[in-house]
Image (cartoon, grey):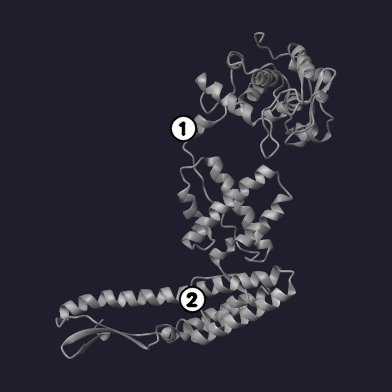
Amino acid sequence: MTNFLIKVDATFYARLDVPKDLQQHYGKKVLKKSLRTKDIREAKALLNLIIGEWKTDFQRVRGSWRQELFEAVQPLNDLIRYSPDQQAVEAAKTSLQAIQAQAKAKFGDTPEIPTDEWQREYQQSLTHKIRNPGKLVALPDNTTGPVSQIIEDIAQGRIVPKSDLFREQLRQKFSAFQSDHVEPKTHDMRLGALKEIAKYFQINKLPLDKAGVAAYLETIKTQALTTKKRKLAAGKLYFDFLRDENLVSENAINPFSGHKLREKQKDAARTKRQPFRPSHIEQLYNEAIDRNDLPLADCIMIDAYTGMRIEEVCQLKTTSIDEDLLIVDDAKTEAGIREIPIHPALKQRIQELCETSEDGFLIPSSAENKYGKRSDTISKRFATIKKALSFGPEHVFHSIRKTVATTLEHAGITESVAADILGHEKPTMTFGLYSGGSSLKQRQEAIGVLSYKFRQP
């Protein structure tokens, strides 16, 4: 340590040689600072602090110039790659060359670590580029080699910082691809999750690796298990997109895979959806009637006799009635498109709804959300009445559908027939692939086992 300590007259000074690649930045070859003491023991104690600060600043400067260069050239590279304006492209190329020349003049051509160690890593880098021609690679934290070569790679866009894999333009391209393949709501949820993930990685300047994803998951550990799974799924899709874009190696392991998400068994049991008892459904129906909410009461009744999803009920039109059948032609899955026999106890109310419909729908809805869903306001009103009747989070509108499934099972209805009524995929090849489905008579008999005591509104 005393090698860094010098004495000028009677006062001790800290002294440190500036690495060659940083001399132009500091404007000097040696850093020197008075410790303002003549006591050797006090000087040695102060020396540790000063030398530590200088070495930390060396690391900061070496990292910051790369990041500054990335930020300067990225918009120019994006313009060159994507702009249809050839004049703007040529101007960007000129600016890029000027920035590259300025950086080379400022930082020179000095290896950033000792030559022997650099030589080994540089050879590995060359081997990687030969095996992966034309592919961009994420810049590792310990990038080595001649500074001029690193500057050229950055300027030409051949390497990108790991955190830059989340840049806005890439996410927009991912968004455009996804929008053609998924439902709008699913698309928006994925982009929202990706935006949150990107913000975390960019703020913390983390590399896109498994450790970084694990650190992100730690920040959302209190969120619901399904939420965490959804966000991980969005990340997995985005990393696959980066691989397709040749921004990461095709052999790279997806960092969003392999994470163990745990949920307390007690919490899982509490939130697992449970069926209502038939008497509970009657109570909910009566509460809706008492609140003068006839559309909600009708939704509850139709669902109780059909097992339909709430949005399927709200999408029923007067044209969805074919004699004694309800035709579901707007479902979330192919199996959901089906014909459900109208329960005898439901026929009169269905006829009244058809006769009084003002817009062609059986259930009037005050608003549609941006995804075309008609059930949102009714779902919220249902949540209000079920809470008023002291039902917890394990009971939702979908629980009525579970009641229907449970009643059918208890009555000995075969799973194949129940699946045709509820709109489920059939689990076996025989019924799922080769069968044309259950007969109308079988479905009518099955629907007939459903029984409630709904009072007249």
Between the residue at mark 1 and the residue at mark 2, the CA separation in whole angstroms equals 51 Å
At 36% from the left and 77% from the top, the residue drawn is: 55
Q: Quadrant of residue 62?
A: bottom left
Assign a secondary structure to mark 2: helix
Q: Position of residue 234 (x, y in %)?
A: 61, 50
Can the viewer see residue 377?
yes
Tag 1 secondary structure = helix
Residue 99 appears in which quarter of the rendering?
A: bottom right
Pair 1/2: label in front: 2
Quick one: 433 or 63, which is closer to the camera? 63
- Where residue 212 appears, x then y in whole percent? 50, 58
Q: Tell me the crowding category of disc 1: few under 14, some 14 to 19, or many 20 or more residues within 10 angstroms, Cα based.
A: few
User: Tag 2: Cα neighbours inside 10 Å, few (<14), some, or many (≥20)?
Assistant: some
Residue 127 x %, y %: 61, 78
Question: Residue tagged by mark 2?
Answer: 65
Which mark, by number, is residue 191?
none
Q: Going 47% across and 55% down the picture, which residue do you hit?
A: 215
Sequence-wise, the earlier of marks 1 and 2 is 2
Q: Amino acid at mark 1?
A: Lys
**Horizontal side, residue 94 vs residue 106: left or right:** right
- Residue type at mark 2 is Trp
**Left or right: where 128 falls relative to 44:** right
In the image, residue 72 lies at what x, y percent? Answer: 56, 73
Q: Which residue is mark 1?
A: 266
Residue 109 shows in this picture? no
Above or below, comparing residue 394 to residue 15 in the picture: above
Image quarter (top left, top right, bottom left or bottom right) of the N terminus = bottom left
Question: Does the residue at mark 1 contact the one at mark 2 (Cβ under 8 Å)?
Answer: no
Q: Which corner quadrant of the image does residue 305 belong to?
A: top right
